[in-house]
Image (spheres, rainbow, N blue to C red):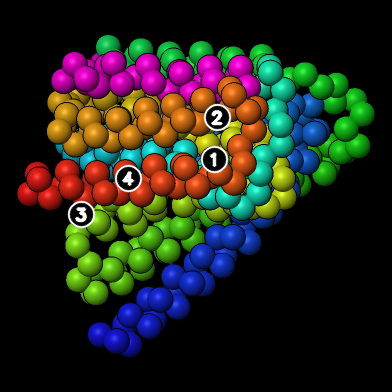
C-alpha cells in the first residue's frame, strides 16, 4: 500500500508539473493570437480559452446525462462555478493584484456575472426539460454575440503578428489545452486514489478533489495568466467558463435527458455561487480591480463552501 501511494504521489506531482508548463504556453500563444485577431485578451478568454477549459465538464455532462445521472453533472457544473470564482480567482488575486479595468470592461464583466445567475430560475422549479434546454442554449448564443461585439475594439493592421505566427499560436493553444486537460485527468485520478487509500471522508473528496478536478484546466491557465499580469485573459476565462457551464452545458444536460434537479444538494451550491459571484461583482464595481485582500476573502468563501458541502452530504447520508 505504501509503495502504491508513493507511485501515485509521483504521478500526481508529474501531472501537476506538466499541467503548469502547458498552461504557460497556452497563455502566451492565446495572447499573441488575440493581437493578431484584433480582439482583447478578455474576449479571447471568453471565446476560446473558456470553451476549451470547459471540455472536462462537457465530458461529464454527456456521459452522466446519457446514463440518466443528470444530477451528477448538475452538481459538477454548479460546483465548478464556485470553484472558478472563489478558489481560482481568489488564488490568482492573492498571487498578483489585477490591473485597474476601465468602466466599459467592468460593465461587461458585471453583465456576464448577472447572465450566469439567470439559469438558476429554471433549476428551482424542480424540472429541467427541452424548453429549459432551448432557453439556456439561446442565452449562451446571446452571450457569444455580446462578447464578439464588445471584444473587437482594435485594428489588427498594426498587431506585428504575421498570419503564419498566428496559425502556429492557434495550434499551440489547442495542443496546449489538450495537454492541460489530459494531465489534469491524471492528477485528479491519482489524487482520488491517494485520498481513498488514506481513508479520507468520501464527501470531503467529492467536494474538494473531484469538484476541483474539472476546474483544473481553469486553475492552471489562470495562475499562469495572473503571474504574467494577463488579467483580461484570466477573468475572461473564469466568467466565460461559468456562463458556458450554466447555459450551454446545462442546456445540453437537459436536452439529452430530462430530469428532476436534486434541490437539497443544488440549493446550498447555488447559495455559495451567489455569495462568491456577488462579492466578485461588488469588488469589481467598487474598486475596478482585485487585490490580495479580495483574494483572501474569496478563498474564505471557498473554505465555507467546502464546509457547507461536507455538512450537506453528511446530512443526506
Residue 129 belongs to magenta span:
yes
In this rendering, position of residue 59 left or right of residue 129? right
First in sequence: mark 2 or mark 4?
2
Q: Which mark is residue 294?
A: 1
- Nearest the camera: 104 or 247? 104
Disc 2, disc 4: CB below 8 Å? no
Q: Tell me where the magenta segment starts and ends, as one range.
A: 106-130
First in sequence: mark 2 or mark 1?
2
Q: How dense is the environment of label 1, judged by Cα within 10 Å: few (below 14), some, or many (20 and up)?
A: many
In this rendering, position of residue 69 left or right of residue 284? left
User: Secondary structure of the magenta portion, mostly?
Assistant: helix
First in sequence: mark 1 or mark 3?
3
Question: Mark 2: which secondary structure?
Answer: helix
Q: Which residue is mark 2?
A: 283
Disc 2, disc 1: CB below 8 Å? yes
Question: Mark 4: which secondary structure?
Answer: helix
Disc 3, disc 2: CB below 8 Å? no
Q: Which residue is mark 3?
A: 203
Amino acid at each position: 500500500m505504501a509503495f502504491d501511494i508513493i507511485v501515485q504521489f509521483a504521478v500526481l506531482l508529474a501531472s501537476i508539473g506538466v499541467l503548469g508548463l502547458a498552461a504557460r504556453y497556452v497563455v502566451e500563444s492565446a495572447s499573441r493570437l488575440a493581437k493578431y485577431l484584433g480582439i482583447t485578451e478578455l474576449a479571447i478568454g471568453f471565446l476560446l480559452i473558456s470553451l476549451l477549459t470547459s471540455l472536462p465538464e462537457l465530458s461529464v455532462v454527456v456521459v452522466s446525462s446519457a446514463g440518466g445521472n443528470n444530477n451528477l453533472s448538475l452538481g459538477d457544473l454548479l460546483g465548478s462555478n464556485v470553484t472558478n470564482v472563489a478558489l481560482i480567482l481568489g488564488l490568482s488575486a492573492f498571487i498578483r493584484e489585477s490591473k485597474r479595468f476601465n468602466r466599459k470592461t467592468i460593465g461587461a464583466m458585471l453583465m456576464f456575472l448577472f447572465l450566469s445567475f439567470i439559469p438558476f430560475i429554471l433549476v428551482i422549479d424542480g424540472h429541467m426539460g427541452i424548453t429549459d434546454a432551448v432557453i439556456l442554449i439561446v442565452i449562451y448564443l446571446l452571450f457569444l454575440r455580446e462578447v464578439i461585439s464588445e471584444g473587437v475594439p482594435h485594428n489588427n493592421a498594426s498587431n506585428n503578428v504575421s498570419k503564419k505566427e498566428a496559425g502556429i499560436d492557434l495550434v499551440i493553444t489547442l495542443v496546449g489545452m489538450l495537454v492541460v486537460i489530459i494531465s489534469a485527468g491524471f492528477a485528479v485520478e491519482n489524487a482520488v486514489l491517494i485520498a481513498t487509500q488514506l481513508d479520507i471522508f468520501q464527501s470531503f473528496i467529492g467536494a474538494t478533489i473531484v469538484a476541483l478536478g474539472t476546474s483544473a484546466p481553469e486553475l492552471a491557465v489562470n495562475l499562469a495568466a495572473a503571474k504574467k499580469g494577463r488579467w483580461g485573459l484570466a477573468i475572461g476565462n473564469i466568467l466565460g467558463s461559468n456562463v458556458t457551464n450554466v447555459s450551454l452545458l446545462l442546456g445540453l444536460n437537459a436536452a439529452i435527458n430530462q430530469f428532476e434537479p436534486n434541490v437539497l444538494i443544488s440549493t446550498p451550491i447555488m447559495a455559495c455561487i451567489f455569495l462568491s459571484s456577488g462579492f466578485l461583482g461588488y469588488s469589481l464595481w467598487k474598486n475596478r480591480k482585485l487585490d490580495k485582500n479580495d483574494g483572501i476573502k474569496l478563498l474564505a468563501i471557498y473554505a465555507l463552501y467546502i464546509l457547507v458541502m461536507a455538512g450537506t452530504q453528511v446530512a443526506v447520508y
